[in-house]
Amino acid sequence: MATDQNKFQAIISHCKEYGFVFQSSEIYDGLSAVYDYGQNGAQLKKNIRDYWWKSMTQMHDNIVGIDAAIFMHPTTWKASGHVDGFSDPMIDNKDSKKRYRVDHLIEAHAETLDAAAGEELIAKMNALLAADDLAGLKALIEAYKIKCAVSGTVNWTDVRQFNLMFSTQLGSVTDEASEIYLRPETAQGIFVNFLNVQKTGRMKIPFGIAQIGKAFRNEIVARQFIFRMREFEQMEMQFFVRPGTQKEWFQYWKEERMKWHLSLGADPAKYKFHEHEKLAFYADAAEDIEFEFPIGFKEVEGIHSRTDHDLGRHQEFSKKKMQYFDTEINQNYIPYVIETSIGLDRMFLLTVCNAYEEEDLTKDGKEDSRVVMRFPAKLAPTKLAIFPLTKKDGLPEIAKELMDICKPHFHTFYEEKDAIGKRYRRQDAIGTPFCVTIDHQTKEDNTVTIRYRDSMEQERIPLDKVKELVLNKINE
Ligand code: ATP
């Protein structure tokens, strides 16, 4: 059985081998920290996205969804603080020319020390980061004689802030062109549309605006597969509340979001909240939902109480009033905001890590094993595989008829090649929860064998009950 690091590597290989995730532009040796989703991955990602969208918008009467553009007026990013503040301290090694995120460089070194010394180093680093002491960080790297992994030298530049936003030029005429950014988060598209949505939707506080879309960050150390990417997707929701009620709403959304995660069936012990040690100056409260990946507990989602900071800043920079008139208390105010922000790709990685299992099936001394992806039925890329036992005797015709009945309702797969056992294993590897085999008995009594992915149990059920059974399971 794989150890945790090995398990993570095994999951990455599995994702490639079974059409979930490929390195971007692989034929050109790939583009670092950019990934493509294959035939099974794209479907799984869509199912996660749809599940989030439905639980946020359809299941909450007071939340609506929007789809804002990736490009936004450049002043947006001035107002949001990203132009001046969205940066990480970096250091370059003068010999290898390799650039490192200072925290990652120091953390990697801390891992090579014994536990107490490692903790001491991390504590020193955290204090310097909190104080924005760049010279102090460089002195720390020098004091510990931290080497560049490539050149093996300690020949470092000064520590500098490096902005994580990608920029490009807008307009075809160079003179008129102005620098714009690829959005580093989707949230600002919601803030700048606050008044549009509130007025046209006649929304009453408390209400939320949800959005799913791409975000871009020039992450310097992009490691750990799709955990940290340069192009990724976020699912964010800003919930606008009356000032003074934000603590209750923060609590509400913390619980609500944890319930959402647990509704997908993972062991609750694999989840925990992590309170931010250092709050942004405008924030009231901030906690992350962390999940135990094979590489340890890591953030999947952030829940933040952002006060009236963002709307206030947009009011200041745009000179447009971002106020709401609350008829219940006869008062105008800038609403406070609770934000829930989850990475779709990170949720995908969570789903894949949680589902992956190498199962030992050795029985009576006969060695056997399988890799099974135990996706919740509602997220599985393919819900049902239909197999005629043989390619003849009219069995494929019956199978295709069943396919036509099921196809409009959920994703169905048909296959007539290879032995049934092999076909089952291929479906286990992509997480298909149900397989149905059409055999000669089907012709006599209209029953089929249904085989359950998780238990591998098989039973005979009427052919005309297949669609209903699968639908019930995916809607559970
Ligand atoms: P981290 O500390 O991991 O860099 P963050 O605190 O900067 O994340 P937020 O800005 O709060 O993250 O973004 C919200 C969510 O977006 C994160 O919880 C994560 O799921 C996702 N996310 C952020 N950056 C990336 C990335 N580079 N690749 C994939 N997902 C990301």
Image (tube, rainbow, N blue to C red):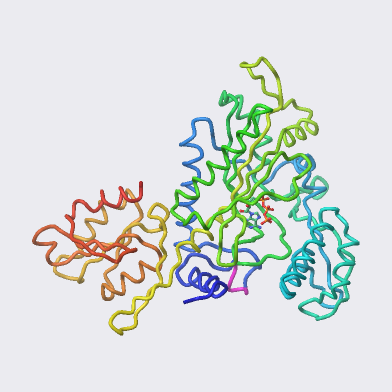
Highlighted range, magenta: 25-29
Would residue 338 be found to the left or right of residue 473 on screen?
right
Count of all numbered marks drawn on residues in the image: 0
Residue 182 or 374: which is nearer the viewer?
374
Looking at the rendering, which quadrant does residue 294 occupy?
bottom right
Q: Is residue 151 magenta?
A: no
Question: Residue 135's quadrant in the figure?
Answer: bottom right
Q: Position of residue 86 (x, y in %)?
A: 77, 51
The vertical placement of 98 against 434, above or below, is below
Q: Which of 365/446 is in front?
A: 365
Q: Quadrant of ligand 1?
A: bottom right
Residue 458 locus on image (x, y percent): 23, 64
Residue 22: % across, % down: 54, 68
Q: What is the chief secondary structure element of the magenta stretch? A: helix
Image check: 287 left or right of 354? right
Which residue extends farthest left?
Answer: 444
Side (left or right) of 231 relative to 168? left
Q: Nearer the viewer, residue 457 or 221?
A: 457
On the picture, is 327 further left or further right than 15?
right
What residue is shown at x 78% (from left), y 68% (from top)?
106
User: Residue at (85%, 53%) from the top-left corner?
Assistant: 131
Q: Point out residue 194 in the picture as x, y percentages from the top left corner.
A: 65, 31
